[in-house]
Amino acid sequence: MKKSIIFLAALALIASMALTGCEFPSKGESSGDKVTSGEYVSPYANSKDIFAKYYEKADKLMKNMSTKEKVGQLFLARYPSKYEDANKEIESLYPAGYILFADNVKVETQTSLKDKIDANQKRAKTPMFIAVDEEGGTVVRISSSPVFKEKPYSSPMDIYTKDGMEGVVENATEKSQFLKGLGINMNLAPVVDVPTSKKSFIYKRSFGTDKELTAEFAKEVIEAMNDEKIISCMKHFPGYGDNADTHKDVATDKRKEEAFYSGDFLPFVAGIKEDAPAIMVCHNIVQAFDKDNPASLSREVHDVLRNDLDFSGLIITDDLAMAAVNKYVKSNSAAKTALLAGNDLIITSSLSTHVDEILNAITNKELDIELVNNAVRRILAAKMYYGIIESK
């Protein structure tokens, strides 16, 4: 019964996507198997794993990594307040990478920031993701400083209003080139949530309330960022909707399943078809899929992303330090729960604590090392795909 409902909703989604010129594979195309009458096949399936070419090389690299090194690769950590502390963590905790915030760059120049990032990378046994939230508009970590930009990047929605989609693509390209010039190889953008009200928390960070237009935006920006070989990250799956700010408290989404398949998923599907490398999962409790857990910690939500939307890239949590997570996990179990749910890369503001948590879970046989290996394989392959790790 549930799959029938999903299939009907998916048909509505296909019809709406047709308005924007997007096409989906026909039944059975994703696997090549013969489909019998009445059998449900996901209309999102694209049958390709974008990092597959590098998995064998990633496995060879993992053979020379200790368990602690592999566990460190599960984490995208908040950059410490002191540069020296980052160097210590790099040498002892082996993080997959760091996220820079405005406080990390406000005292830097373009030259000094690039020099520090380069020095951090030289210390890393495994080259790192260096990430930032440079969405434009209300969330600008680098361009907020006049040392880096005369004025902060405008929001994509404002750019579109002034210069159309061509202006949005031009901005995404220029921004990507600018960030890469600083040594930043991952931008945690675009925001592809589709609120229905201008009063919604996420509205000013979104591309507006038009789901088809947001799908086009996702497609164009992912393509532009891929052309510049910088890692994009669509957020916040399965769609933030009109929910409250999960930085401050728990947010519960009570919408029906069909609303996601016919609305919120459109931009994610469009981005996935353009080889989106990463998707961030939000902390909302989305009752249509899981009434008990935040989406970031829900196996059911991750299964939808992997199986229904056929996403093969990195699944990334929002920061585990946010209030919406802390109310739903036991002490010292957030990272373990996130990994068990199906995340590959975990954003943390408590790197040492979470590395120890995963190491203890492995020792106590609460986590199978193969689960860690599967995530690390995808992370290393992604780094090879984007040239962060040489793949000769």
Image (cartoon, grey):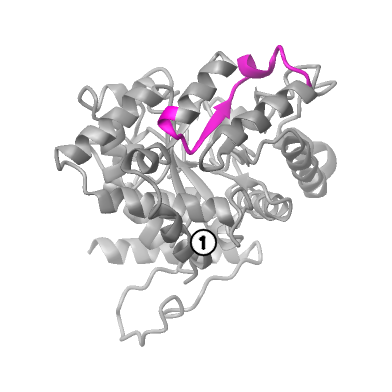
Q: In this view, does 381 lie above or below 253?
A: below
Residue 106 sits in quarter = top right
Q: In this view, does 6 lie above or below 296?
A: below
Residue 290: image x %, image y %? Answer: 26, 43
Residue highlighted by disc 1: 51
- As rendered, which of 66 and 43 lies closer to the eye? 66
Residue 5 falls inside the magenta stretch: no
Residue 233: image x %, image y %? Answer: 56, 44
Q: What quarter of the picture does the N terminus occupy? A: bottom left
Left or right of 116 on screen, residue 272: left
Q: Is residue 229 above or below residue 163?
A: below
Left or right of 356 on screen, residue 234: right
Could one spot residue 96 in this view of the protein? yes
Residue type marked 1: Phe
Could one spot residue 311 in this view of the protein? no
The part of the chain drawn in magenta is: 92-109
- As rendered, which of 62 and 309 lies closer to the eye? 62
Left or right of 73 on screen, residue 382: right
For the point 38% across and 43% down, the residue is: 70
Residue that protrudes farthest toward the front in the picture: 64
Residue 61: image x %, image y %? Answer: 45, 55
Residue 108 falls inside the magenta stretch: yes
Residue 287: image x %, image y %? Answer: 29, 40
